[in-house]
Amino acid sequence: MSAGEGVDSGPATGTGELLDSLGPRFEGLEPRPTTDHPATRCRAEFIRPLLKTLRDEYGYLMLMDVTAVDWDEESPRFTVFYHLLNPKTAQYARVSVDCLDDDEPEVPSVVSLFAAAEWHERETYDMFGIRFTDHPDLRRILMWDGYPYFPLRKEFPLAGIETELPDSEVGEATEAKVLPAPMMGGPFVAQSGQPMSASEPRGRDESWTEHHHRPEDFDALEGPEQPETLEDRSGDKPRIED
């Protein structure tokens, strides 16, 4: 039977009702705080059978998104999130899985259940460095092969990092590099031990622009200097070239 054929659309349940129904079948299933859709935390070994049950028995036929959160100094450091939609009831559900290894995070791929997961998982791998085991083609999708960083990890600066272009011939001809972007505050760094809602965004003093350049010794500074306000800087306002 193909996905969706003869499937009951399922009730538009809340988190409590969903857990009451699924809890006895999946050990360790527990609720996540939520203000909108049913949300639950699942163990990694149960993510495939749980999502299959939500698809086949509860009508969550569409995988809308796969993404992750880097909790910085907390452990588990990385959590993967799956957002599903029941198209008949317009009900969403959110499932999360913690990556137990902070240094080499991984979770099982769900491409065998949802074809849409192929690119979603590749993007999550590309941005966070989380590997999806049994993915049929786990390659970077936004950054080039060999790029040494994962841009959505907390230690990666919002301005970016100066990096050699992947094609040496292009770099030689243009004498160009991938340069950090001008900043107006940031990167946004959550304080450990505080809720994200209370601590994001919290910017370090990296508020340089094309007129207020990044100090060459910035990385060696023991602590950030107090930034000037934009009003205190003459000529710092953005301008449009003709």
Image (cartoon, helix red, strand yellow):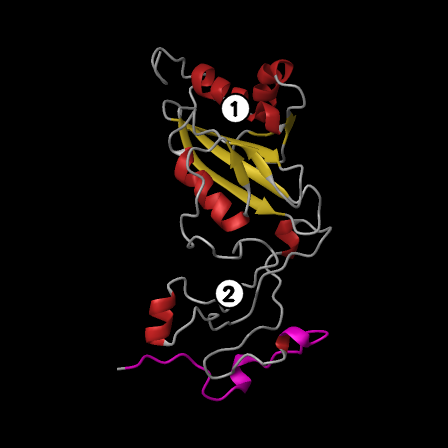
Residue highlighted by disc 2: 160
Left or right: 33 as drawn, with respect to 61: right
Residue under the image location 52 percent in, 66 percent down: 161
Residue 43, x across and y down, in percent? 63, 27
Marks 1 and 2, the one that precedes in the sequence: 1
Residue highlighted by disc 1: 48
| The furthest residue to the bottom | 234
Residue under the image location 48 percent in, 78 percent down: 209
Label 2 secondary element: loop
Work out whether residue 36 or residue 180 is closer to the camera in this orientation and state it: 180
Residue 202, by quadrant, is bottom right
Residue 103, x across and y down, in percent? 66, 46
The stretch drawn in magenta includes residue 227: yes
Label 1 secondary element: helix
Residue 164, x across and y down, in percent? 45, 67
Give the distance between the C-alpha atoms of the residues marked 1 and 2, in whole angstroms: 35 Å
